[in-house]
Amino acid sequence: MKFTKHLKKIKILVFLIIFCLPTQFFFAETTSSDKEDTDEITINFEPYTKDNIPDWAHDLRRAEIITFGSLPFTTLSCTFIYSLYRYYDSGFDSTYFPNPFPSSSDDADLSTDEQIAILKYSCGFSLFVGITDFIICTIKEQKEQKEERASNDIKNGTIVIIPESKVTETDPSNTTKDKTEIPAEALNE
């Protein structure tokens, strides 16, 4: 019996030696004399920059990360809330007390249908968290773009002022006739 255990260990050791030892020769770095004899093509890879990836793909990736990252927390929360509901529904029976390790009673174990329902709700909540983050980030980006356009208008020297008295209550979008453009230098005087 002891011999078979040692034989298995010897076989594993021989297997590792046979397959690991040749890799040292195949993947070894070439020496300086070898480099002079061969013409090698070197390829330099540049890392991705912000210009390589479109904004929508970046936002979508962020939403995906937030959605899957929140899944363990929403699953834990849904399980705890469902356990509290079962405890309340059973008339505060001590066998249904919310316990993360319910090995004390077979009655407290969750059925397969209950586990699937908890998983569905937690996936739904995680999706809600991801979509909410996506919407908030989109609104922030739009606000930043609007502020950047406004600051560029000031830097370019053109500011558009629309008098409030000229905006009619019936058609507030009809303000094109009453716009006054003032150069930014005139405001500094």
Image (cartoon, rainbow, N blue to C red):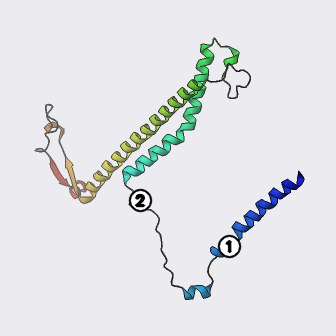
Name the residue: 36% across, 42% down: 139
User: Dividing the picture into quarters, in which one does residue 116 lie?
Assistant: top right
Which residue in the rendered view is the most extreme toward the top?
91
Does residue 23 appear in this view?
A: yes
- Asked whether 133 or 110 is in front, the reply is 110
Using a 10 Å C-alpha cutoff, classify the residue at mark 1 as few (fewer than 14 neighbours), some (14 to 19) or many (20 or more). few
Residue 182 coordinates in the image, percent (x, y):
18, 53
Instruction: Name the amino acid, label 1.
Output: Gln
Name the residue: 28% across, 56% down: 152
The number of callouts visible is: 2
Could you tell me which secondary element the residue under label 2 belongs to?
loop
Using a 10 Å C-alpha cutoff, classify the residue at mark 2 as few (fewer than 14 neighbours), some (14 to 19) or many (20 or more). few
Q: CA distance from mark 1 to mark 2?
A: 39 Å
What residue did someone put label 2 on? 50
Whether residue 162 sits left or right of residue 70 in the image: it is left
Does residue 27 appear in this view?
A: no
Q: Nearer the viewer, mark 1 or mark 2?
A: 1
* Vertical side of 176 occupied by 13: above or below: below
What residue did someone put label 1 on? 24
Name the residue: 70% across, 28% down: 101
Q: Earlier in the sequence, mark 1 or mark 2?
A: 1
Instruction: Name the amino acid, label 2.
Output: Lys
Could you tell me which secondary element the residue under label 1 belongs to?
helix
